Image: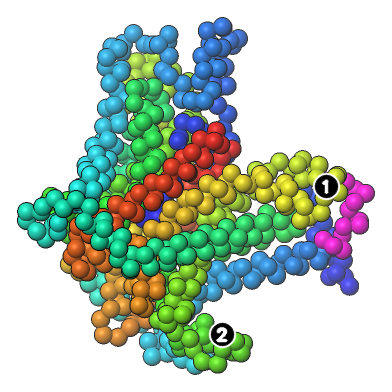
Amino acid sequence: MGRGVLAPSPHKHPSIDGRAVAPLTERDGLGAATPHRKASAVTSTNTVVRPVSTKRSTPRWAPTARRLTPYAFLSPTVIVMLVLMLIPVIMVIGYSFMDNVITNKNPVFVGIDNYVEVLSDPVFRTATGNTLFFTLVSVAAHLLLGLGFAMLLNSPLVGNVTKALFRVVYILPWLFTVAIIAVLWRLMLNPNGVINYILISLGLTDKGIEWLSSPDTALLAVTFINIWAGYSFYMVTLLAGLQGVPADLYEAARVDGASAFQRFWNVTLPQLKPIIISMSVLDIIWTSQQFALIWMTTGGGPVNVTEMLSTYTYKLAFSRYEFSVASASAVLILLLTMVLAFFYVRHQKARD
Amino acid sequence: MTTFAQKQTSAVRTTPDGARRSPAQKPRRRPKERLAKVVIILLLLTGAAFAAFPILWMASSSFKPNTEIFAYPPQLITSTFSFDAYITILTDPTKVRFFINSYVVSLAVTALTLLVAILASYAFSRYEFKGKRPINMIIVSIQAVPPITLLIPFFGLMVVLGLYNTYQGLILTYLVFTLPYAIIMMTGYFNTLPKELDEAARMDGAGPLTVLWRILVPISIPGIVSVGVYTFMIAWNEYLFALTLTRTEDMRTVPIGIQLLMGQNSYEWNEMMAMSILGCIPVLILFLFFQRYFIGGMTAGAVKS
């Protein structure tokens, strides 16, 4: 799926649309604060959602019924999450300790055999290395391109209509599903395709390169496609961040005689740092899980040079029907992701 | 020379933050600013070529006959311009079925996600209850669970439940990926609405459901549109589960349909490109109409005020 937003905990971030929102406690507006009200406002500054005050309860509502109301509202969510998230995660962990499940009617417990098999498979190690390369290069390039485009679009020297137009154009790649992106770039990167034509015309190469089927270039080619497909997210978010940098910070820097580069380095970057870190962690999580792009361009080939952890696991399960070994691999991927998610959540907490 | 002067004045006039600069600095900066503007426009154009050329090429290829896809030298618009590829796709019941499937699944996922998420967000936004923080934490962290980890148990589960190769199976699956995000965004939106609104209604004796549907939902339409658009897009674009949890051609969605065109005997590039164009139209239309909401959805996660 990959394009959801792993957003920080909602009741701590009362903003949507990137707009700042005054804490609701400020809006009580019921005249002068009594000592009691003041105390309640202080305790609830963190949790913007203020508890339904028992002091103001409507007598109509029986206390037990009121206590159960939020659970009733949450029950559909909890049921969906239990059945479709908790149970599957337990299932996959269970599978990973059994012999061949799904294909075998009576699977037997085999301990950590499947993990040993996965970890000692050289292809798994290749896939880990490829995933690392693919992820780190993509994330770094996304960040650089996203920041560059965002700064261009934030320039005061260009008219607003022009900027709005360019912004739409720059967001376009993000609107296309990975399946479309994959076939599109297969067409463009074809040995007789338009990219090779341009390169030959510029004299950069003398014959068409098999970008996606040559072992030397396949990994670079899929990484490039992923860079093209993903920078928009950074651009849009960083643009919102840039517009939030207080103008007087730049003014102060200018008064101090800071050059444009110094202003960027000492004002812009520190202001954007929290956003950059959040987005990079999110992007690392998403990119390391990329499946469709690889599957539809190279399928992990040639000779495993573009094999990723996701395609490796998929092949184990649905090409070789080794569901147990695939489950072990899937659990390992889950563990890696959980480590990243842990850092993300900790970073979000630190920002509060 | 006149154009030169005009450019200069317009550059000054269209500078939004011009007011911030002290008048003494302005004249000295002007020639530098003009150069900077030219450089910025050139960079913007380069960026636009990088972003848009592949998409232009896709559109152009969809209007070519398949034999001219790799014609030398390549041309953006050929004399053989035709809608044949589109006609082939739109008159083939199998391919039309891909689109119907995608619409059915995506619309159902969007409706269900909104319904369930609005209920949950109301609880998160307006109630304090035991277990609120842990449940919230779980919802946030669920989004990091890799789809590939869930794929194998989902496959087993859907076969056992008899939902393999059905709409219901896909719809339920997508809910897992859209709900956490939708709840987080929706709660954020409800939190921006003053509590006095629903408290006043409650004083008049309205129950919580009435407050939610009659008071909160109508004024939350922008937030709901934002979540809905994003949910639709996730469902419309999903690939991995659509590939694994459906088997027959009549259950495939558009992303899988595009891949199916690629497999068989020869590559029908023009048809693939036409199908891609048709396949991105719903998202493109949503984007153009709801751009602000889209961007709101994109930035909600990482930007903090």
Dot 2: within a 10 Å radius of its alpha carbon, few (fewer than 14), some, or many (20 or more) residues? some
Residue at image position (23%, 48%) is: A93
Our reading of the magenta stretch's main secondary structure is helix
Q: Toward the viewer: B106 or B96? A: B106
**Residue lying furthest left:** A105
Q: Vertically, is B138 above or below A318?
A: above
Q: Which residue is mark 2?
A: A198
Q: Toward the viewer: A177 or A334? A: A334
- Quarter of the figure with residue A51: top left
Residue at image position (38%, 46%) is: A338
User: Which part of the image, by quadrant, shows the C terminus of chain A?
Assistant: top right
Q: Secondary structure at mark 2?
A: helix
Amino acid tagged 1: Arg
Residue at image position (50%, 70%) is: A224
Residue at image position (50%, 57%) is: B288
**Is A327 displayed left or right of A2 in the figure?**
left
- Residue B244 in view in this figure: no
Q: Residue A16's x, y, as percent?
A: 51, 39
Q: Which residue is mark 1?
A: A254
- Residue A201 in view in this figure: yes
Real-space CA distance between mark 2 and mark 1, rounded to the nearest whole angstrom: 44 Å
Q: Residue A272's x, y, as percent?
A: 63, 47
Q: How many marks?
A: 2
Q: Which residues are magenta?
A: B20-33
Question: Do the CB atoms of the residues marked 2 and 1 lie less than 8 Å apart?
Answer: no
Residue A72 is labelled as none
- Residue A226 located within the stretch drawn in magenta: no
Amino acid tagged 2: Ile
Q: Tell me which label, 2 or 1, sits earlier in the chain.
A: 2
Q: Vertically, is A19 above or below A147?
A: above
Which chain letter goes with mark 2?
A
